[in-house]
């Protein structure tokens, strides 16, 4: 943790390290190490690199991880058959289908083939329902990472105004549900929101998950707010967030980009894997 012009820098590394330590000790307590299966379809370079880094991160914590690669021109029924087979395999604790899929494949139908209790990305409709119902389940990793960051730095959530910009299934909506579960008053803003600046200015906690570099500017942020930047866009070879750096002049706390929220996503995937394995192994006893 370090401070810049009075603005607390919410670095992701120490939080991710603490989470990974928890994962290692969770793995050590299990009868057998969790097994996490990645499924990748095609050779999109970003997907190849994401899956490889997630697989390595898993292995470093003692999780057994492997990847099944299907050709880019795989038929929907073959993908669904693989996911159904992994779901029925007792030796498998977690399944992650890397998205996006190549054109022509239906990701919603494919995700529905993953057993909800092995759905470590938290995208199966059963887990979406559990999230909004306040039940136990497996929930999307980037959204879980936001809560982890705030908790780590002792930033309160209950009773505070959280404005989440972006309403995707992957980040915005699950973040809204998690903040609601933690008793925040939640607003979800999006591309059709009128007076985005006025809405964001109400927030004690701002989450920017859009993919428009520098969208959130200093004048839009209430002095003293905590600002979490999820957006990640490559501009001229550099990574830019959704939050303009001048926001540090008014915010009380701000995640750096890079080095902030992104580091938590993979860590929370591994938490989900240990959670899935622990629930399965204790249930089977
Ligand atoms: P997405 O599915 O494209 O959703 C973007 C959201 O932003 C949509 O809800 C869209 O509104 C909204 N939006 C677009 N332009 C806007 C504007 N001018 N003002 C207000 N809202 C606007 O993206 P995503 O998957 O949620 O990802 C969002 C960003 O986070 C991307 O940059 C992505 O790379 C990054 N990301 C980072 C991580 C990480 O680990 N750090 C993980 C996932 C994603 P509508 O719904 O009205 O179209």
Image (cartoon, rainbow, N blue to C red):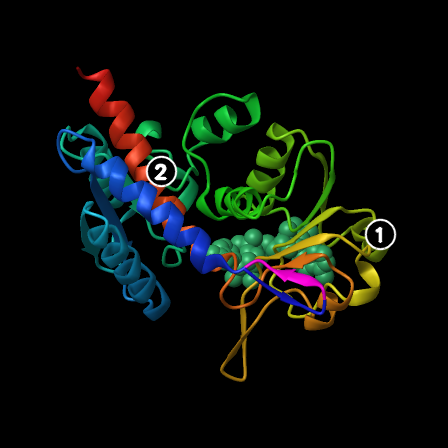
Main secondary structure along the magenta-highlighted residues: strand
Q: Is residue 131 above or below residue 50?
A: above
Residue 8 sits inside the magenta stretch: yes
Q: Earlier in the sequence, mark 2 or mark 1?
A: 1
| Residue situated in front as seen by the camera: 1 or 56 | 1
Which quadrant of the structure image shows residue 28?
A: top left
- In this picture, residue 191 sits left or right of residue 103: right
Residue 72: tell me if it is visible: no
| Residue situated in front as seen by the camera: 11 or 169 | 11
Q: Residues within 10 Å of mark 2 (few under 14, many from 20)?
A: many
Describe the element under mark 2 as helix, strand or loop: helix
The residue carrying mark 1 is 194
Residue numbers of the magenta segment:
6-10
Locate the C terminus by quadrant.
top left
Locate the N terminus by quadrant.
bottom right
Which residue is rendered at x = 55% and y = 21% of the image? Answer: 133
Residue 150: tell me if it is visible: yes
User: Which mark identifies residue 167?
Assistant: none
Residue lying at the far bottom in this picture: please name it. 236
User: Which mark identifies residue 272?
Assistant: 2
Residue 220 percent across, percent down from the top left: 81, 60
Residue 254 percent across, percent down from the top left: 64, 60
Q: Is residue 191 above or below residue 79?
A: below
The quarter of the picture showing ligand 1: bottom right
């Amino acid at each position: 943790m370090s401070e810049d012009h009075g603005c607390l820098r919410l670095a992701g590394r120490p939080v991710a390290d603490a989470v990974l330590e928890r994962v290692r000790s969770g793995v050590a307590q299990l009868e057998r190490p969790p097994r996490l299966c990645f499924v990748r379809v095609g050779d999109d370079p970003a997907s190849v690199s994401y899956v490889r880094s997630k697989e390595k991160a898993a292995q470093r914590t003692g999780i057994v991880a492997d990847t099944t690669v299907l050709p880019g021109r795989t038929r929907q029924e073959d993908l669904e058959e693989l996911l159904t087979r992994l779901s029925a395999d007792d030796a498998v604790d977690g399944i992650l289908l890397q998205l996006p899929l190549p054109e022509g494949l239906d990701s919603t139908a494919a995700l529905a083939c993953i057993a909800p209790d092995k759905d470590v990305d938290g995208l199966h409709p059963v887990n979406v329902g559990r999230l909004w119902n306040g039940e136990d389940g497996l929930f999307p990793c980037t959204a879980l990472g936001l809560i982890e960051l705030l908790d780590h730095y002792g930033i309160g959530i209950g009773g505070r105004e959280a404005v989440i910009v972006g309403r995707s299934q992957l980040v915005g909506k699950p973040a809204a549900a998690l903040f609601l579960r933690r008793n925040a008053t939640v607003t979800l803003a999006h591309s059709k929101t009128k007076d985005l600046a006025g809405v964001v200015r109400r927030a004690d906690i701002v989450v920017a998950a859009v993919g428009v570099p520098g969208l959130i500017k200093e004048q839009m942020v209430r002095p003293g707010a905590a600002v979490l930047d999820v957006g990640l866009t490559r501009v001229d070879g550099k990574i830019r967030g959704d939050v303009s750096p001048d926001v540090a002049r008014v915010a009380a706390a701000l995640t750096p980009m890079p080095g902030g929220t992104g580091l938590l996503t993979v860590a929370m995937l591994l938490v989900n894997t240990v959670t899935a394995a622990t629930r399965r192994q204790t249930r089977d006893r």
